[in-house]
Image: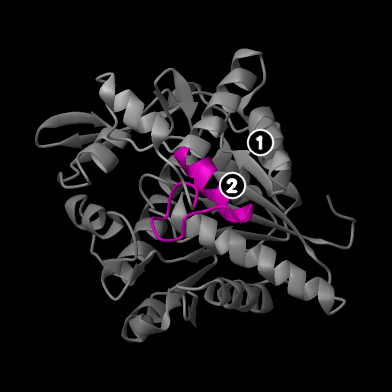
Amino acid sequence: MSDSADRRVVVLAGGYGGAKLSHGLTLASTVRASRGAPALDLSVVVNTGDDLELHGLAVSPDLDTVMYTLAGLANDETGWGVRDETWSTAGMLERYGAETWFGLGDRDLATHIRRTQLLRSGHTLTEATAELAGRLGVPARLLPMTDDEVRTQIRTPDGWLEFQEYFVKRAQQDTVLEIRRRGIERARPTAAVQAAIEAADLIVVAPSNPFVSVGTILAVPGLLEALLAASAPIVAVSPVVGGQALRGPADRMLESLGGTASAAGVVVHYREHYPGLVDIFVLDETDVDEVPALEASGVAVDLQPTVMRTHDDRRRLAEAILAAHLSG
């Protein structure tokens, strides 16, 4: 995908926040190339703990969100699925009495059908993802965190829930008391993930949920060790701005799992659970008042406008990260 002069960037991503920042990096790469600067060789390592089987099909929500976003197909209003989607199949499934709480549009279903075909014919999830992304013209390497089955589960006051049951069916309304990942002890990072991390010039932890997105990636045995051994600087972008998660339940999880719902709380979480991992934390300018105490405790902070409402916002944040933390 690139020549030896390109700068290798790895992103650790969940769904929408990771997709937006990854998109910003592809936009920034195009601008760099137009100015004669080295382009980016981008690899996005994506959480697969949210995956599920639905209607007999293999569904990978975070992979699909990143893939659709980088292919220019994403529904930016919802943050998931394909724009201008139709719902004839879902309507017919409902008539048949099937559960339709997890919305699968007609074009989205084609992705899951093709992925399932590839997996059942013996392809790994990494191979199936490369085939799908290649067909859609995705300008990056999409890498599942593992080819092994991992399923995130959430303990609530009502008991254990599968992640999508908590996240979609029950709309994240339950208090999160504990997180576990079925199958994680048998999982291993793929050779492609390990190679991308080892060769990286910069590693970016996207503004994704630090518990169920980034945390699940880091829980794959051997993956955290690979990151700690990497020569590239590791930059983490906070998903919490002004005390609130920009999307999803990260702020509520920070509180219910013993932390603080703030940008500083995100920093403390990463430092306590993954000491030595992150070199620089990128916080939004809104959280400037939290910086002195963090810097006094030895934390390197980069203040940037991190809220990505538009495509230009995505590009500008990516460019700021690259300018400050990528050599060349």
Residue 192 lies, with reference to residue 263, above or below; the image says above
Q: Residue at x 37, y 44 (%)?
A: 212
Q: Tell me whether the residue at label 2 lies in contact with that at label 1, contact meaning CB atoms closer than 8 angstroms.
A: yes
Q: Position of residue 295 (x, y in %)?
A: 42, 80
Q: Is residue 213 left or right of residue 175?
A: right
* Residue beneath disc 2: 67
Q: Estimate the spatial distance between the alpha carbons at disc 2 and disc 1, rounded to whole Å.
A: 9 Å
- The numbered mark, 2 or 1, whose residue comes first in the sequence reads 2
Q: Residue at x 57, y 28 (%)?
A: 188
Res 113 → quadrant: top right
Q: Amino acid at mark 1?
A: Leu
Residue 132's disc is 1
Residue 215: say if magenta: no
Q: Is residue 74 left or right of residue 290?
A: right
Look at the image and give the residue range highlighted in magenta: 60-83
Q: Amino acid at mark 2?
A: Met
Residue 235 lies, with reference to residue 210, above or below; the image says below
